[in-house]
Image: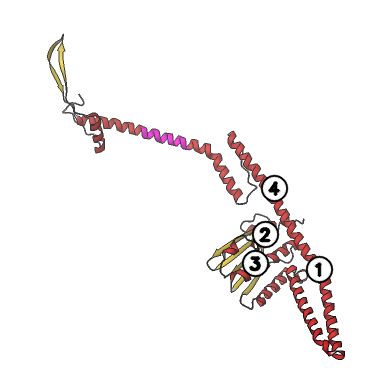
Amino acid sequence: KSVCRGGITAEQWPGWFENIYRWSFHPGQEIERQVTQDRQIYGTVTVLPSAEMELARAWHDVKKLMGLSAVTVVSLCTLLFFALGWALRPARLMVTGLEKMALGELSTRLPDFKINEWQRTGQAINLLAESLEKTLSERKELALKLVNAQEEERRYITRELHDEFGQSLAGLAAIASSITQTAEKECPELVPEGIMTARITSHMMELLRGMLSRLRPIDFDELGLTESLKNMVAGWDIRSGNKINYTIDIVGDIDHLPDLILVNVYRIIQECLTNISKHSGASHATIKIERIMAAQAEGLNQQSDCITLTIKDNGIVNDLVIVDKPGIGLLGIKERVAALGGYLTLQTCELSLAIYIQIPLHPIALKSP
């Protein structure tokens, strides 16, 4: 009776639903049935159902089904979200641990997991990190030994050249001067040869002095790092013909440090100035050295002092300076900094290049080979 004509409904349905329902079920069709009793026909019954009532009832049922489906889907998604979150939690921990290891924190270790597969994977990653940490530690120690051996060899060569070759040249210069004086009185024809010999000897002494300065500054052991750096910067100003203005700023006490740190800081700055002179085309370069507490230095966690170096210039940034290629010195600087357990950062912009270096003064960095 609820779908007979004459029924009243307030249910509304969208047009797309009506089109689909009418195409699928053809509502409102007339139905006839005969009325029989004891095989005798007494008449017919004709039913005219209301298509609107059928649509209203169908739409009402569909809405309930859609609501139930929505609740079911939301519930399943929620349960699936928490289930996957719990199942993939070890993966997130692994990704976080690997990111820390990629940043250099090789002491990071993954926790234990309840699932056997995750546990085995975590153990493999921990073993790999431990092996890599040990390898890098051994590499740093080896690099430190090589740097120290190189400086010891340079010191030995410098001492031998200064004591033996330098004294020989000094004696040769004295003999040339004596020959010249004697020749002026007894054999004037030999005076030009004596003067030429003295000039050659003087030139060789100048070359030897420059070589000794590059190997190990003569005033390094006597005056300390501060004065040596100032003399080096002044020398670069003179050699550049004032085309490049070098300035140096020293903050804190940097002279009373282990010899290994002093020598490497000097070599790093020397190599940076060489790169600026050869490749940058700059007109101004600044060097700043500061000794500060490691707690104030970003990136260092050691509870001890550290040395920070900042070298800037206003020259043209060449890709050759950034790429690790032999001959430009940057690779050697990185190796020295890494051997001392420090950090090196390059920052470039359109018209300048800045090198930031931090060297910690903790026992590992100062350990002798």
* Identity, as a three-letter code, of the amino acid under mark 1: Arg
In front here: 68 or 18?
18
Which callout, 3 or 1, points at the residue further toward the start of the chain? 1
Q: Can residue 258 be seen in this view?
A: no
Residue located at (13% from left, 13% from top): 41
Q: Residue type at mark 3?
A: Cys
Callout 2 secondary element: helix
Of callouts 3 and 4, the N-terminal one: 4
Q: Give the residue displayed 53% in from the left and 39% down from the top.
A: 88
- How far from the left and from the top, in percent, is residue 315? 57, 70
Q: Spatial distance from mark 3 to mark 4, Cα to Cα?
A: 31 Å
Q: Which residue lies furthest to the top in this view?
A: 38
Badge 3: few (under 14), some or many (20 or more) residues near its Cα, within 10 Å?
Answer: some
Q: Label 1 belongs to which residue?
A: 159
Q: Mark 3 points at which residue?
A: 272
Tell me the residue that label 4 is attached to.
Answer: 134
Q: Distance between the residues labelled 3 and 1?
A: 26 Å
Residue 122 seen from this side: yes
Q: How far apart are marks 3 and 2 (CA)?
A: 13 Å
- Image quarter of residue 191: bottom right
Label 2 sits on residue: 337
Comparing labels 4 and 1, the label whose residue is closer to the camera: 1
Q: In x, y percent, where is residue 361? A: 70, 59
Q: From mark 2 to mark 1, how far is it between C-alphas? A: 26 Å
